[in-house]
Amino acid sequence: MSLERDRLVARTPMQWTTGRHAGFSEVEPWLPLASDDPQLTVERQMEAPGSMLNFVRTLIDLRRRSPALSIGTYRSLPSPSDVFSFERRHPDGAVQIHLNFGDLTREVQKPKQGRVQLSTRGATIPDAPESYRIKLRANEGVMVSEGELGSGHLVEVADQNGWL
């Protein structure tokens, strides 16, 4: 089996630093590093607010603080083509997730009291009660809350290296 068709191409050493062997090991790893880009190391991503590492940390924090996300009920929501929408609901509040997997902008409905808490591409709409629609850009995902999750976490993840 060739390496290109094997799962091993996705299982590369974790790139911790910009040092020798990316800080993964004192000896040369048996699998090659995924990239020589220093921006992909944990060391650099820890310093970058818009990094994938910090985006995932924000998601984990929101899940820990939100009963709707951690133990709430699930229901699918109607959505346009290429968009996957669902809601997690708990007596303390609800959270909607809208994920646009397409290459075109799509619109989804926002609850009247909903607030955009997080976006994979940065702020997309003014946080105004009169705005009931959200324009999702291509390959964008948003989290909308009803109830308090905090002051909002409009995080923009760097759109580099095909992450989004």
Image (cartoon, rainbow, N blue to C red):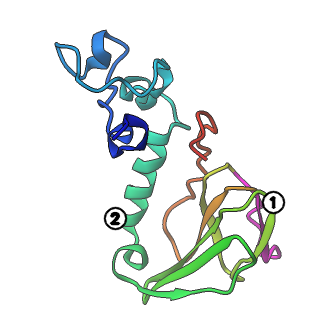
With 117 as the anchor, is 55 left or right in this view? left
Task: State which quadrant residue 32 falls in.
Answer: top left
Residue at image coords 46%, 24%: 35
Q: Main secondary structure of the magenta part?
A: loop
N-terminal of the pair, mark 2 or mark 1, is: 2
Residue 52 versus residue 95: which sits nearer the camera? Answer: 52
Q: Which residue is disc 1 drawn over?
A: 104
With 71 as the anchor, is 112 left or right in this view? right
Mark 2 is surrounded, within 10 Å at the Cα level, by few (under 14), some (14 to 19) or many (20 or more) other residues, namely few
* Label 2 vs label 1, nearer the camera: 1
Tally the marks.
2
Residue at image coords 66%, 62%: 101
Q: Amino acid at mark 2?
A: Arg
Q: CA distance from mark 2 to mark 1?
A: 32 Å
Q: Where 8 sits versus 39, above or below?
A: below
Q: Which residue is disc 2 drawn over?
A: 64
Task: State which quadrant residue 54 falls in.
Answer: top left
| Segment tinted magenta in the rendering | 123-137
Residue found at the very far front of the displayed protein: 1
Task: State which quadrant residue 50 falls in.
Answer: top right
Where disc 2 sits, the SS reads helix
Residue at image coords 19%, 19%: 25
Residue 161 versus residue 52: which sits nearer the camera? Answer: 161
Q: Position of residue 154 (x, y in %)?
A: 61, 52
Instruction: Check the picture and name the quadrant holding the N terminus.
Output: top left
